[in-house]
Image (cartoon, helix red, strand yellow):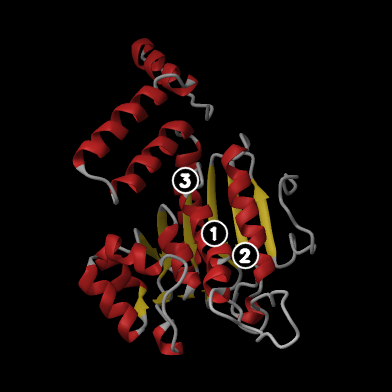
Amino acid sequence: MTAPTYANDPNGILGTDILFEISDNGVATLTLNRPDAANAITPDQRNLTISLMEGASNDLNIRCVVITAAGERHFCTGADLRVSTIPINPGPADAPDKVLGDVGRNIKRGAQRLIASIMDCEKPVICAVNGTAAGIGAHIAFASDLVIAADNAKFIEVFVRRGITPDGGGAYMLPRLIGMQKAKELIFFGDDLKAAEAERVGLVNKVVPQAELMSAAGEWAGRLAESPTKAIMLSKWLLNRSLDSNRHGAFEDEAWAQEMASYTKDFQEGVAAFKERRDVEYRGW
């Protein structure tokens, strides 16, 4: 299939810096395609990725999203600082180029929106990490629902090494995924975390040989694409909210999620298939 019409691509990078394909089984694959630049992400790539992830939520052709990158060395080495700029705000002639609030606003509109678009996507998201994932590149993986890494992949919290603090939700996600002490170790030192160790501490679901990465991701994506999409959506919503809720709130959410799921066609199909002792065929709605 061709790229969907909901993609906001004013600079024409879809099909060049970003590849996006929807297979017949409902798996959408988004590929960062700047291997010569270590797949460092530009503002245009970031904004288009946000558009594609947001669009995937309401596209009934899509049942699962896989995020990966071109090449075998780098998944994404962070924001491309050569082209990442903070817009200059209008002001009097003697105003400085940067004032308090500019950087924070840029982060909110950029890196945080990118990570939120992955976490909030209503379809399950698999990240297939084909190499080094640093900075926002690592956070794209951590924001995904499932992570499969090639055996040569590594993750780097590179921010402090550059004299800055984590952005794109790193300080929010890491303690919740691996605990506070390990999160501080990774952020304070910025050491490389190899794929096998990332799997051991719980940042990665599976590590496979580089040559098997996309087939492994495709196998999981295919299974998810055949699953009841709305039930997965609501389960994802429950799990993500549970990180910031108490027992009472979590139980209330659970009840409402079950209520909403019970009105879907896939719920009706699942119950009918069970009663009729036949194979189930979910459609995604």
Whole-number angstrom distance, CA of label 3 to CA of label 1 = 18 Å
Residue 120 versus residue 72: which sits nearer the camera? 120
Image location (x, y in percent) of residue 133: 47, 74
Q: Residue at x 61, y 79 (%)?
A: 80
Image location (x, y in percent) of residue 142: 40, 62
Using the rendered view, name the quadrant where residue 61 is placed.
Answer: top right
Q: Which residue is most to the top?
A: 276
> Circle 1 sits on which residue?
113
Q: Amino acid at mark 3?
A: Pro
Residue 171 vs 95, above or below: the answer is above
Q: Amino acid at mark 2?
A: Arg
Label 3, residues with CA under 10 Å away: few <14, some 14-19, many ≥20: many
Mark nearer the N terminus (2 vs 1)? 2
> Circle 3 sits on which residue?
124
Q: Where the N terminus falls, by quadrant?
A: top right
Using the rendered view, name the quadrant where residue 278 is placed.
Answer: top left
Mark nearer the N terminus (2 vs 3)? 2
Whole-number angstrom distance, CA of label 2 to CA of label 3 = 19 Å
Q: Residue at x 29, y 50 (%)?
A: 244
Residue 279 vs 6, above or below: the answer is above
- Nearer mark to the viewer, of 2 and 3: 2
Image disc number at residue 46: 2
In terms of secondary structure, where does tag 1 sit? Answer: helix
Q: Amino acid at mark 1?
A: Arg
- Whether residue 25 appears in this view of the structure is no
